[in-house]
Amino acid sequence: MISLQSSKVLGATIKDLIIPAERVAHVQVKNNLEHALLVLTKTGYTAVPVLDPKYRLHGLVSTTHIMDSILGLERIEFDKLEHMIVEDVMNKELPCLNVTDTVEKGLELLVDHPFVCVQDENDVFEGILTRRTILDRLITHFQTNETKKDPEA
Ligand code: AMP
């Protein structure tokens, strides 16, 4: 059963849990795949958001998308990296959140994704909500409430 305390945390907005856009590694739609692979490798992230010069969100690109696109019949065609652009290989079908959405909605989307992008009503990228951040918040919440229930614990 969901307690009043739990509904308070699940019903709160994701606003305070977002990693803001300026701290999120991203690539631009027209960047070539060599640049995108460099960003992904250097940051160690599996996927990063794809933005346009006006900071609008267009998709996500991952190392898997890139490697898949240069996979030839007999070899990996690394020379293609320089000539192909992110827009050609990115995933455009992605779930998105708004800053006013609830933690519960974020949690539901994060079941299937390690992070979800957050954008405003004009598709301008605001940041990301990660599975790690939301799980951290829930653990803190449950631990705090356990201690309140049982001060000896
Ligand atoms: P984490 O929960 O920190 O392991 O992050 C999960 C995924 O979210 C990473 O693999 C990245 O794809 C993405 N991510 C997390 N933090 C950032 C960031 N600062 N910039 C870009 N992507 C990020």
Image (cartoon, rainbow, N blue to C red):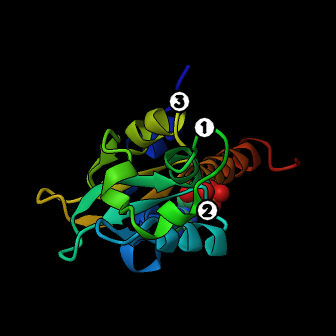
Residue 145 picture location, percent across and down: 66, 46
Residue shown at the point (61%, 62%) measured from the top left: 45
Would you say residue 149 is visible in this rendering?
yes
Q: Say what amino acid the circle numbered 2 marks.
A: Tyr
Distance from disc 3 to disc 1, alpha carbons, whole Å, reads 56 Å
Q: Say what amino acid the circle numbered 3 marks.
A: Ser
Residue 56 picture location, percent across and down: 21, 65
Q: Secondary structure at mark 3?
A: loop
The numbered mark at residue 45 is 2
Q: Say what amino acid the circle numbered 1 marks.
A: Leu
Mark 3 or 1, nearer chain start: 3
Q: Is mark 1 within 8 Å of ligand 1?
A: no
Q: Which residue is mark 1?
A: 73
Q: Residues within 10 Å of mark 1 (few under 14, many from 20)?
A: few
Q: Is mark 2 within 8 Å of ligand 1?
A: yes
Q: Is residue 83 left or right of residue 139?
A: left
Q: Which residue is mark 3?
A: 3
Quarter of the figure that contains the N terminus = top right
Decide: is 30 above or below 134: below
